[in-house]
Amino acid sequence: MKWFFRIIGLILALFILLCAVGAFLPATQRVDRTVMLSVDGDDIYTLISDLKTYPDWSGVGGPESEWVFGGAEDGVGQTAAWQVENTGADRFGSLEILQTASGEYVRVRTIGPLGEQTVTLAIDEGETETAFLIQSERALGGFPYLGRIAALRQKSQTEAALERATQGLESLLR
C-alpha cells in the first residue's frame, strides 16, 4: 500500500512540475517563413487572396484532398473546407479569410490537424524582388498550461507546413 501512495505522489508531483514549466512558456506560438520571389507583388496577392488557389500551392490537405468553397466570391468572407479520406484516419479542416489589404496582406483563420491558427500572408515589394512572408500564430491556452508544452511538438509540424506553402507558391509562380 505504501508503494501505491508513492506512485500517486510521484504522478501528482510530475503534474505540478509540468504545470509550473508550462506557466513560464509563452501564451502564443508564432512561426514564420519568408521567401524572396522574382515576381510582381500583385501576382502574389492575386493567388493568396483567393482560397480557390490554395489547393495548388498551400500544401493544406495534400494533393489527395477534396475541397469545397463557399462564402463571399472574393476577399473577406471566403471560406473553404477540405477533407482527406482513405488514409486510415480521416483528416479535415477549414479556412476563412478574415482581413485583406490589397497588394499588402491577407489574414486567414485555419482549423485543422494542428488546431486553430491565424495565418498572415504578407507581401513587401522591392525594386527587383518581392518578399513573401507567411506567419502562423496560435493561442496556447491557459491553466493548467499543459497545452503550451504540447505545442512544442506541434511547432515543428507548423514549420514544415509553412515551408511546404512557401515552396508551393514559389514553384507555382515560376
Image (cartoon, helix red, strand yellow):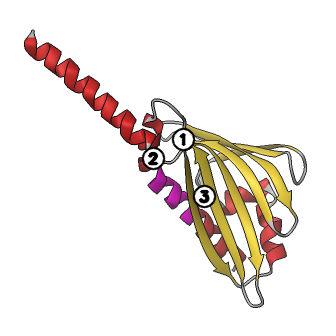
- The structure residue drawn at horizontal position 37% and vertical position 41%, both measured from the top left corner, is 21
Residue 34 quadrant: bottom right
Mark 2 closeness class: few <14, some 14–19, many ≥20 residues within 10 Å: some
Looking at numbered disc 2 in the image, what kind of residue is underneath it?
Answer: Leu
**In the image, is residue 63 part of the stretch drawn in magenta?**
no
Q: Nearer the viewer, mark 2 or mark 3?
A: 2
Quickly name the residue at label 2: 25
Q: Left of 133 or right of it: where is 105?
A: right
In the rendered view of the protein, which quadrant contains the N terminus? Answer: top left
Quick one: label 2 or label 1, which is nearer the N terminus? 2
Q: Nearer the viewer, mark 1 or mark 3?
A: 1
**In the image, is residue 162 part of the stretch drawn in magenta?**
yes
Query: Distance between the Cα atoms at labels 2 and 3?
Result: 29 Å
In the rendered view of the protein, which quadrant contains the C terminus? Answer: bottom right
The disc placed on residue 88 is: none
Q: Start and end of the magenta stretch?
A: 154-164
- Check if mark 2's residue and mark 3's residue have beta carbons within 8 Å: no
The disc placed on residue 140 is: 1
- Check if mark 2's residue and mark 1's residue have beta carbons within 8 Å: yes
Quick one: label 1 or label 3, which is nearer the N terminus? 3
Mark 3 closeness class: few <14, some 14–19, many ≥20 residues within 10 Å: some
Look at the numbered disc 2 and give the secondary structure of its residue: loop
Look at the numbered disc 3 and give the secondary structure of its residue: loop
Quick one: label 2 or label 3, which is nearer the N terminus? 2
Residue 19 position, x and y percent, is: 39, 34
Quickly name the residue at label 3: 59
From what the image shows, is residue 10 above or below residue 30? above
Looking at the image, the residue that sits furthest to the right is 73
Is residue 97 visible in the rendered image? The answer is yes
